[in-house]
Image (cartoon, grey):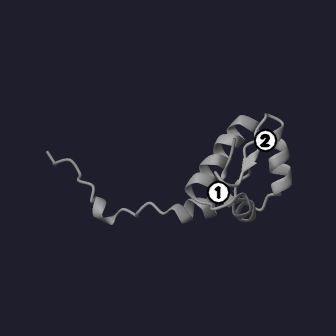
Amino acid sequence: MKPPLAIDISRETAYDKTQIVKGASAMSLPNDPMILLSYVNTQLRDFHSSLDDFCKSMQVDAGELQQKLAGIGYEYDAELNRFV
């Protein structure tokens, strides 16, 4: 009987936030406003210094994004860098 296979974790690729952001730019933003809010605030917190930076990297219009989130009662706070 052969021993179970061991996984060599030293060869695993390190977690790279920039890859995730680049990969995310190829996908579309969530349509559901609440999921969109959560996604955008997470991206702002983890990867972007401003809404403009986020919108530029995602190739979306900041005005349209703000309008959609205003529809559920949220507005962008530049000081906090998040929708509140």
Q: Quadrant of the C terminus?
A: top right
- Helix, strand or loop status at disc 2: helix
User: Mark 1, mark 2: which one is toward the viewer?
Assistant: 2
Q: 6 or 3, which is in the foreground?
A: 6
The residue located at (78%, 35%) in the rendering is 73
The location of residue 23, given as percent across then percent down, is 62, 60
Q: Quadrant of the N terminus?
A: top left
Q: Can residue 14 be seen by looking at this rendering?
A: yes
The location of residue 76, given as percent across then percent down, is 74, 48
Q: In the picture provided, is 14 more to the left or to the right than 34?
A: left
Task: Name the residue tied to disc 1.
Answer: 24
For the residues marked 1 and 2, what is the alpha-carbon distance in whole angstroms? Answer: 19 Å
Residue lying farthest to the front in this orientation? 79
Earlier sequence position, callout 1 versus callout 2? 1
- Helix, strand or loop status at disc 1: helix
Residue type at numbered disc 1: Ala
Q: Residues within 10 Å of mark 1 (few under 14, many from 20)?
A: some
Q: Can residue 32 be seen by looking at this rendering?
A: no
The residue located at (63%, 62%) in the rendering is 49
Task: Name the residue tied to disc 2.
Answer: 69
Indicate which disc residue 70 carries. Answer: none
Q: Are marks 1 and 2 in contact (CB under 8 Å)?
A: no
Q: In the picture provided, is 37 more to the left or to the right than 62?
A: left
The location of residue 54, given as percent across then percent down, is 69, 60
Q: Compared to 41, does 52 lie above or below?
A: below
Residue type at numbered disc 2: Leu
The residue located at (58%, 52%) in the rendering is 45
Quarter holding residue 9:
bottom left
Q: Compared to 53, does 62 lie above or below?
A: above
Q: In the picture provided, is 15 more to the left or to the right than 60?
A: left
Q: In the picture provided, is 62 more to the left or to the right than 37?
A: right
